[in-house]
Image (cartoon, rainbow, N blue to C red):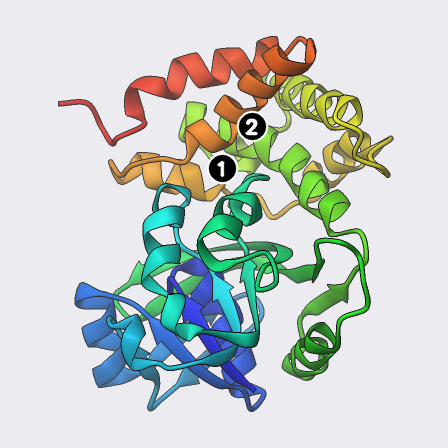
Amino acid sequence: MRIAVIGTGGVGGGFGAALAKAGGDVTFLARSAHLAAMREHGLRVEGDRGNTLIHPVQATDDPASIGVVDVVLFCVKLWDVESTGAAIKSLVGPDTAVIPLQNGIDAAARLTPILGAKAIMGGTVGISATIGAPGLIKQVGTMMAMSFGELDGRDSPRGERLLALAQKAGFQVTLTPSIETAIWVKFIMLTGVSGVTALTRLPIGSLRDDPDVFALFEQAMRETEALGRAKGVKGLDGVAEKHLAGLRSSPPTVMASMAHDLIRGNRIELPWLAGRVVSLGKELGVPTPANAFIYAALKPYVNGTPA
């Protein structure tokens, strides 16, 4: 199975390396020092699940050089969706599956007019990982899960083929007829965890035992759950409660990727996380005061640390 990983950060690097180790023909799209290090030393993944080295590694900064693939794991930051989608048209053949694995809830809809509805599947992942150094992905904790499926819920031979490879790769994987629900389940968790860890610049272990801070996690998640129900997404009852219980046992060093980006002074995905909750809340008449606070407090950092 030919796989192109578009964006070799924590998500693309972690899952792409696992699929390559399992026998997938994986090519990574990367750039700058990260690409140079991968070409020279391979792609390394280190963390609580153990260490993986893919060397030599197929890596490029030119999507046109890859050719048509079976699966595209689309892992760029949310502000790059449209521009990168247009740049990878040459990878998409009549049976190619493009699976956006970003945060948020809108990536598939944003890619559809660019690459065509037939190409797009839905997907979501659970992993705490980031680029630790050029050529190195650092993972925190052992969670590594992927869910994907056709947007209309139909049976999917291409999905079955990826499922088989992913099972061989050893991470938790689900081919689901209800991918919209899976995406929203993550979104409910992420609005709380990304917002609060970014606001405080602290990992979960430094936050969850403070009742005032935990209340902010809780309110942000419950608002997002209510928003999903108002939008008609099925299977969300009790999701926030489950996430809050899981927060108690998460590895103490976990921080959302948005918090890492904020600390590094980089651009952040806020408009598609708390910002999207706020805009949908206004559209659907659902109050979202916690997410509105998170959005307003972090908005000056959307394009990186203010000068």
Q: Which quarter shows the C terminus?
A: top left
Q: Residue at x 42, y 43 (%)?
A: 78
- Of residues 103 and 198, the one drawn nearer to the viewer in this rendering: 103
Q: Position of residue 50 (x, y in %)?
A: 54, 74
What's the distance in space between the residues labelled 2 and 1, CA to CA?
7 Å
Disc 2 vs disc 1: Cβ atoms closer than 8 Å?
Answer: yes
Q: Is residue 149 above or below residue 269?
A: below
- Residue of label 2: 207
Residue 3 shown left or right of residue 219 in the figure = left
Q: Position of residue 36 (x, y in %)?
A: 19, 75
Q: Label 2's element?
A: loop
Quadrant in which the N terminus appears: bottom right
Is the residue marked by circle 2 packed among few (<14), some (14-19), or many (20+) residues within 10 Å?
Answer: some
Is 31 placed above or below 259 here? below
Query: Which residue occupies the extreme left position in the image?
Result: 307
Q: Is residue 254 visible?
A: no
Q: Can you identify the residue that label 1 sits on?
A: 203
**Residue 12 coordinates in the image, percent (x, y):** 46, 64
Which residue does the image show at 26% across and 30% down from the upper left? Answer: 303
Is 254 placed left or right of 258 in the picture?
right
Locate residue 5: give its quadrant.
bottom left
Task: Name the amino acid, label 2.
Answer: Leu
**Residue drawn 72% across the image and 67% down it:** 173
Report if residue 42 is visible in the image.
Answer: yes
